[in-house]
Amino acid sequence: MFTGIVTALGEMESRVAGPTGASLRVRSPWDDLTVGESVAVDGACLTVTRAEVSGSFEADVSAETLARTTLGERRPGDRVHLERALRAGDRLGGHLVTGHVDAVGTVAAVREAGGEARALTVRVPEWLAGELAPKGSVAVDGVSLTVNGVRGSEFEVMVVPHTARGTKLGGLRAGDRVNVETDVLAKYVRRALGRGAEGGGVSEDLLARAGFDTAPLRPAGFRRGRGRGGGRRR
């Protein structure tokens, strides 16, 4: 689990393809990484398989992760966002980020917002748009940001000067691809409402069968049918 507060910029040293994915080698500023710990690389949670006192570490990346993130596009010399896993008792400066990237988004527009601040418009697949809401949270390349607005399958976020200077977000251009992870709470709410890909969820009929009064959920004048007798008398 992470918070979306990037603490370091690392560098991709190598990416070696394998039969089930790839092995990445990343340079970090930390000399105390241990095998088995989790590190978010551009927002994707990876497990350290080898750690060196120089700060370089290796991690295996599955074919699923390569297909769902931009890690398969990274080349030696590319900068990457790094964040170590949240420890109990740490300050939660951003929002709860799992490191499980939902999809790759595309920067649709960049707007200067005064000084070094920039407003980014990011386009995501339509199926993911339902998990975004104004003033909600989203992670872009592992950086926790607040959603300013949502229009169709595009959302806007503001990159403040501190974030622009300390991350790669300040250098993004229209057409760049970024890893996007929506708020984990939004995923459960969407599934509970039956709006996910699998359907199901909570409905008025389900609530009524469970004994809940669903009248407040209906528009004024609406009457649930109960056979030929119409609505149930109370």
Image (cartoon, grey):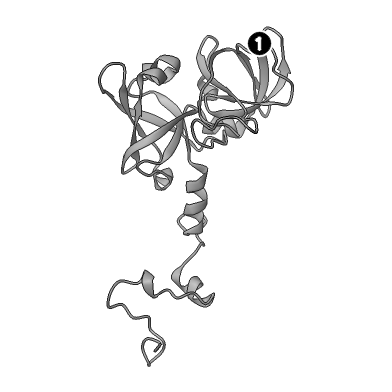
User: Amino acid under label 1?
Assistant: Gly
Which residue is at a point 41% across and 20% down the rendered structure image? 163
Closer to the camera in the image, 36 or 3: 3
Q: Which residue is painted at 31% across and 23% down in the image?
A: 118
Question: Going by the picture, which residue comes out furthest to the top?
Answer: 54
**Dividing the image into 4 quarters, which one contains the N terminus?**
top right
What residue is at 64 percent from the left and 13 percent from the top? 30
- Residue at point 67%, 18% (across, down): 58
Is residue 61 at least partly visible in the picture?
yes
Q: Position of residue 19 (x, y in %)?
A: 68, 26
Towards the viewer: 192 or 104: 192
Secondary structure type for disc 1? loop
In the rendering, at what x and y percent does residue 94 appear?
49, 32
Can you tell which quarter of the image residue 33 is in? top right
Residue 197 appears in the picture as rendered = no
Residue placed farthest to the bottom in the image? Answer: 229
**Residue marked by disc 1:** 55
The crowding category of the residue bearing disc 1, from other C-alpha atoms within 10 Å (few below 14, some 14 to 19, many at least 20), is some
Q: Where is residue 161 in the image (x, y as percent from the top left)?
A: 35, 18
Q: Where is residue 231 in the image (x, y as percent from the top left)?
A: 37, 86
Q: In this view, does 64 lie to the left or right of 212?
A: right
- Which image quadrant: the C terminus? bottom left
Q: Is residue 234 above or below residue 86?
A: below
Q: Quadrant of residue 99?
A: top right
Q: Which of 89 and 98 is in front in this view?
A: 89
Figure disc tally: 1
